[in-house]
Image (cartoon, helix red, strand yellow):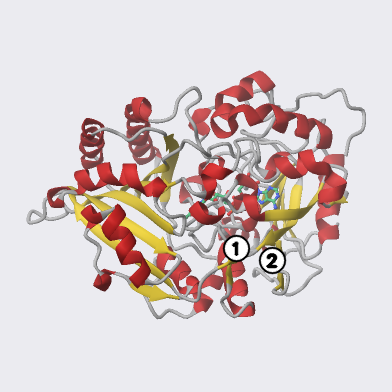
Amino acid sequence: MAVADHSTVSRNKTSEYIFSPASTAYYPLLQSSQQNPRWINSTLSKPLFIITPYAESQIQAAVVCARNHGLQVRARSGGHDYEGLSYLCTTRFVLVDLLNLRSVALDPEKGTAWVQSGATLGELYYSIAKNTARTYGFPAGLCPSVGIGGHFSGGGFGTMLRKYGLAADNVVDARFVNVYGRILDREAMGEDVFWAIRGGGGASFGIILSWKIKLVRVPSLVTVFTIDKRLEEGATGLVLRWQNVAHKLPEDLFIRVIIQDDGGESLASQKTVKTSFNSLFLGRKDELIPIMNKRFPELGLQAKECTEMSWIESVLYFAGYPRGQPLEVLLSRTTLYKTYFKAKSDFVKEPIPETGLQGIWERILEEKLVFMIMDPYGGKMDEISESELPFPHRKGNLYNIQYLVKWEENGFKATKKHVNWIRMLYQYMEPFVSNSPRGAYLNYRDLDLGINRRGRGGGNYSEAQAWGRKYFKGNLERLAMAKAMVDPENFFRNEQSIPVLPTGRKNVI
Ligand code: FDA
């Protein structure tokens, strides 16, 4: 393989796709899609080479070549991994960045599409809207710069999860490169491996090239609203009520709650907690208002607080773009939210009582730039069994919580302070959330839950219970058996990769 040495990041010359640290393009490329600058100064190894393939055969060659040279491989699609696992490693490795493999091939008649892993959610949504006269959408995450490769393989959900489930629930085929450099589709990989890569994290099994997805019908007009209430405006009572109603609402209606610290920057403004009831309704506002009056009148929603728009415009709305932006903003691979952060997740099965909420408010008031994002479940999520896919958090969950703390200062001291704060909040939450195991969402990756210590990813089945049960509950065993079928020597591994559980089968896929 020839190694390119460029003065700029050139993506036009298809022959130049391997970059060593000697290349001036290497560092810009390495940092191009990192979402959490926390990892830029990491002391962990940097890749020996960054490979940006233009053809699938170049990925096959990269895997075979890395294996022959005893190097690890990290695949990166959108670079949003919360712990930087797509571009950091404790040992010598190559980074395969799929940014040049991002086509979306739609079949509007059949309502399906093949999308390459290197595409972003924004590119997928844009392509669907442009090519299907806005009649279709897809139920995946809210942030347009998230990569398809990591997102689909970890589950993936957004504002349509109550109606259509996870992104992974809507995948019908996939193509991936295995440890021997072979390309396998659904039929060739078999149902166990196809099951595993839809929620078990692709990084444990191979490099996923592309996914075939089922698009979903969206109405020509949807309705959005966001209502902010601070503590002094009755926020506590509304959150108490929301916990009882949000998961039982019609599945066309998704109301999430974003809780954050607010004010206190000046002497005049007192610090408080702000709650935002942020909603998508798959229908018109004159249908929405009667539902809200009947099911959640406490919020007092009025027609003037609702905006009707196309589904694709609602994608921009939830991504935080002001109204009137061209759809082309979805094609930007740069995130709107790049900042130092640490996140954690939980699933809630019983409403948190008022005293519990008061304790949360007290803790939020001690910090800055903190968020708790609560997504309601119910609807379609109740209809899918825990073992249908590796993502097990289905019926019985009222909502999931993502805790997030952001900060602006670089350095060890700042990191320690903010990470300690979120760990303290997580500890406080223990009595209020799912237990035995306490659930967590793989796509909100959290290395505090435990790591594969043996060989930093050597992968030991009993060691993996600590984090694996939280992400996958009883599905961990089947994941480890699928791993044995497709990667028995554990070539594809990271700090939280699925360990091998030998099945006794001789035939490796
Ligand atoms: P990245 O490229 O970092 O990959 C993540 C993991 O997948 C790594 O282990 C990587 O090796 C592996 N991987 C990536 N591509 C692969 C491939 N082709 N084959 C095999 N393995 C591959 N989630 C959600 O459900 N709903 C949401 O709304 C959001 N919103 C959101 C906003 C922001 C700002 C961030 C930073 C994150 C989210 N997420 C989210 C979480 C997101 O779904 C999660 O971080 C995904 O894993 C990101 O996928 P990327 O491809 O971008 O990450």
Few, some or many residues within 10 Å of mark 2 (<14, 14–19, 20+): many
Q: Residue furthest left?
A: 268
Q: Is residue 90 visible?
A: yes
Q: Amino acid at mark 2?
A: Arg
* Image position, residue 1 (x, y; %): 86, 57
Depth check, front residue: 273 or 221: 221
Depth check, front residue: 218 or 480: 218
Residue in view at x 31 percent, y 53 percent: 295
Q: Quadrant of residue 300?
A: bottom left
- Marks 2,1: beta carbons within 8 A: yes
Q: Quadrant of residue 199?
A: top right
The dot on residue 140 is none
The dot on residue 102 is 2
At numbered mark 2, what does the secondary structure look like: helix, strand or loop?
A: loop
Mark-to-mark CA distance, 2 and 1: 8 Å
* Image position, residue 168 (x, y; %): 63, 50
Q: Residue furthest top?
A: 462
At numbered mark 1, what does the secondary structure look like: helix, strand or loop?
A: loop
Depth check, front residue: 341 or 322: 322
Side (left or right) of 498 relative to 349: right
Label 2 beta carbon less than 8 Å to ligand 1: no
Residue under numbered circle 1: 120
* Image position, residue 135 (x, y; %): 58, 75
Depth check, front residue: 454 or 30: 454
Q: Is residue 136 above or below residue 20?
A: below
Few, some or many residues within 10 Å of mark 1 (<14, 14–19, 20+): many
* Image position, residue 468 (x, y; %): 60, 29
Side (left or right) of 365 relative to 185: left
Label 1 beta carbon less than 8 Å to ligand 1: yes
